Every structure is written in C-alpha cells, then in structure tokens.
Image: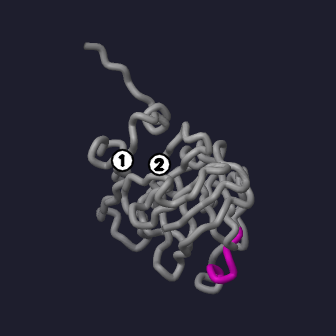
Amino acid sequence: MSRHPLSRRKLLSSGGLALGALTMPAVLHAQSLPEYETEAPAETVRRNVMGFTQHHWQDHFSNLRRGAILCDTQSRAVHFWSEDESTYLAYPSSVPMTEEFTRRGMTEVTLKRHMPTWIPTPNMRERDPSLPERVEGGDPKNPMGTRAMNLSWQYYRVHGIDNPAKVGRRASNGCFGLMNAHVEELYELVQVGTQVRVI
C-alpha cells in the first residue's frame, strides 16, 4: 500500500477532514515549546498544554459574508471560515494574559497591515516604562510579527508573533498572536470587513 503525504494546507482545508480533537490529535495539539519566561532558570522547560476545540460557524455567526474568524480564548486557537465555505482553517494562538485584558463579543477586521510597526499602548507603557516607543516592521523583535489585522476595538488585533513560545499561552495584552507562517496564510484570505467573534 503506498502512502501519500498530506500537506497541512490540504489537511486543514479539506472539507472531509473536520478538525475534531478525537480524530487527528497530532494535528490538533500545539507543538511542545519551551515556556517563554525571562525569570525561569534555563534548565526549566514547561510544555504548552493546548488542544483545539472543534467549532461550527453556525454556532457563532448568522452568515459567512466576507468570511468569519473565531478567536477561542479557552482552547487558544483562531478559526477561519471562507465566505463560500470551501476553506476552514484552525491555528494555535496566544491569548490575553488575564480577564482584565480579554474582550469578548462581535467585531470585524478594519485594517490589514503588512510588516506592521508596533507602538505600545499608553496602558502598556504605563505598566512598563522601559518599553520602546515603537518597533519598526521587519524587526525580529517586533511583537506583531509580519502581519496584523486590526479589529474595530481599539488596540485589539490578530497578528504574528516575535516569539513562537508564546503560542498556546496566555501571553498577550488582548490580541491573538499566530505563528508568522500562519498569520501570513490567514492574511491572504481575510478582507477588511471579515467578521470576528471572540469567545
């Protein structure tokens, strides 16, 4: 019997392979990565414990006009459905650190930014005055990575990430951070006006 390797794109976009945690556990769990903690001893390694929850768009949206993004704070994943239902993708993500930084409900993509410049919010600078005033796009230390999609809520975004160890963790000030390769793929599918729900 010959084996045919499946690419991640084929696997994730296949209508016949719904992302159910019981059927494809290797695909549905984030890779184990060292925890990003500046104060932890070098020998301390913790694992990301995160699994996808399967979602159906009908449970969260009344339609798929301009596509839909679901940001799941519990399973730490971002889901996308295309308007014509031909594409369903799910990506592991970082999520807000605490409830204080978490906003839930309906919003939409209002701006797409390629190689975005990062400017800390006033609250972030108040909490940590040592933060730089800005980090230009393309800088590997840019917390927004290579792409950003602004939401209608001020300062909230779905964007790339500067440190892959943050993915699958409570590590953000309210945004959802994806691996840069993932956010680049999603960026090409999303349009201004794509509806977004955070749960």
Q: 190 or 45, which lies in front?
A: 190
Q: Position of residue 81 (x, y in %)?
A: 55, 47
User: In the rendered structure, which segment of residues is drawn in magenta?
Assistant: 119-125
Q: Position of residue 110 (x, y in %)?
A: 73, 61
Mark 2 touching mark 1, by CB under 8 A?
A: yes
Q: Which residue is mark 1?
A: 28
- Disc 2 packing (10 Å; few <14; some 14–19; many ≥20): many
Please tell me whether residue 41 is drawn above or below residue 111 in the rendered image: below
Q: Which image quarter: residue 24?
A: top left
Is residue 142 in sight in this rendering?
yes
- Disc 1 packing (10 Å; few <14; some 14–19; many ≥20): many
Q: Position of residue 92 (x, y in %)?
A: 45, 54
The residue shown at (67%, 72%) is 153
Q: How many marks?
A: 2
Extreme residue toward the front, this view? 62
Q: 115 or 21, which lies in front?
A: 21
